[in-house]
Image (cartoon, coloured by chain):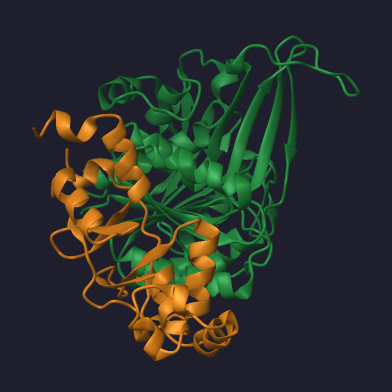
Amino acid sequence: MKAKDIMQRDLTAIMADETVERFIMICQRHGISALPVINPDYILVGYLSESGIISASLPGYLSLMESSAFIPDSHQFFKGLHNIIDKPVSEFMDDKPFKVYANDTVLHVADVMIKNKLKLIPVIDEENKLIGIIRRIGLLSSAAKGEILTDES
Amino acid sequence: MNYDILCVTLNPSLDREIVIEKFDTGELYRINNPSNSVMEPGGKGINVALMLSTLGVKSITMGFLGGFIGKVIQSKLASIHEITTNFVYTNEETRENIEIIDTKQNKITEINSMGPFVSEDDYSHFIKRYQSTMSLTDHVVISGSIPPGVPIHAYSDFFRQALDKNKFTYMEAIGPHFDEAIKNSCPMVVRPDLRKSRRVLGTNIETLDDYIYVSRKIIEHGAKLVVMSYNIVADIVTTAEGSWMFTATNEIDRSHLFGSGDAYMAGIVYYMQKNSPDFFEAAKFGMATAISSTRYIGKILGDEEEINQDTEKFKIEKIG
């Protein structure tokens, strides 16, 4: 089974010059926790997740820590978020995003997602254009149905 | 990844069909048979994408969706392998079209809502996505009504951009936004949706002469093909070469005529993207597709072979 067989064929994404506010609104309305970042030709140029926004909203030294249990005061977070809300996504995105190709095996997809703790991964074609996304729950549900191992083991 | 067409539906709907015998107001009805209460994603552009998916045509569907009903439409479309979705979400709820079909009294009761308000921000977000998505296909279909908040010149702007990029363009709609597009940036294939209104470019279409007159006017604005439904079983087809009447010769199951207009458009688009562009031939294939679709309930078409057989099932007369 290939990545293209389990992906959601949806092109919802954000562009690098759009704001953090728009990012939050799209995620909230679509009920997803991260978005591929694309250029106007639909070429994948980045990735931004909720946790990316949270760490960008916190003072620099806190993002060095592994656990958010050290945050002294959530007020700092809301102030921080307020400061970045109108800034472009390009400032906070991961510009070397994890991604998989349409014809990659689902086993490979699982590998990348689990090792890197990704909730969502963009799927691209051979021209690096976004063609869909795979969510962790989609992967889990294919695995639960036994679809992943049956044809690859 | 290659997509065959882009289908824009600015105001999608969830179409719900409920069959109730001897329906009356003020009564309680229980639906015991699930097939008597079905729901399907709707809106003209989505209908074309759904029908073409049964012929293996890959499409991107765009427009506005919102709220709970929006999610239902999204998940129904997501289950179709040929369809890629790319909707902008609004704050308000997507509309529903409810049809109560009374098979005993032969009556249909319809309840249509207006659609979500589209904010300025969401509209400009859509424009940006449209411009990008258009680059992924050669054929652009924009059909149906516009939701509140979307300007009257929306279709006109979208077709202008598509024509500037040399796309094949198709429109089926009615109303001021439709007229505006014809006047400013006329798409190649135009099909006025005459079910709810007969007013096109300031003329009330009643007589056969009105049909021909208005079709010619649309051709003068730059259309290559104009198709208008006439007396249920016929269509008036107009190109720069003249006007023809296509009349179905076999008995047609009229209860399945719902959606045959969308099937007509789907047939035209299918022909255009599989063959060299010949608008009159595309119109013939569209008519055959519409006839073939009346054999099915729901938004599906027969296969290409079946449609080709239906090209024998109507007669063509030159009328102007």
Task: Spot the green chain and give its letter.
Answer: B
Is residue B205 found left or right of B295 in the rendered image?
A: right
Pick out the residue farthest to the left: A153
In front of the other: A35 or B110: A35
Viewer-proximal residue, A97 or B139?
A: A97
Q: Position of residue B3 (x, y in %)?
A: 27, 52
Depth order, front residue of B234/A63: A63
Left or right: where B195 falls relative to B260: right
Q: Quadrant of residue B303?
A: top left
Residue at the image position 48 percent from the left and 46 percent from the top = B74
Instruction: Residue at 74% x, 9% y: name it.
Output: B104
Badge count: 0
Image quadrant where residue B306 sits: top left
Q: Taking B68 as reference, is B238 left or right?
A: left
Query: What quarter of the picture does the N terminus of chain B occupy?
Result: bottom left
Q: Is residue B134 above or below residue B36?
A: below
Q: Residue at x 21, y 62 (%)?
A: A99
Q: Is residue B17 visible?
A: yes
Q: Position of residue B69 (x, y in %)?
A: 61, 45
- The answer to whether A107 is drawn above or below residue A18 in the figure is above
Which of the two residues, A91 or A73, is positioned nearer the viewer here? A73
Q: Is residue B131 left or right of residue B67?
A: left
Q: Give the colour in which the image draws chain A.
A: orange
Q: Residue furthest right?
A: B26
Position of residue B169 measured from the top left corner of the image (x, y, whole percent):
39, 57
Q: Relative to residue A144, is residue B32 depicted above or below? A: above
Q: Position of residue B235 (x, y in %)?
A: 51, 35
Q: Dividing the picture into quarters, in which one does residue A35 lie? A: bottom left
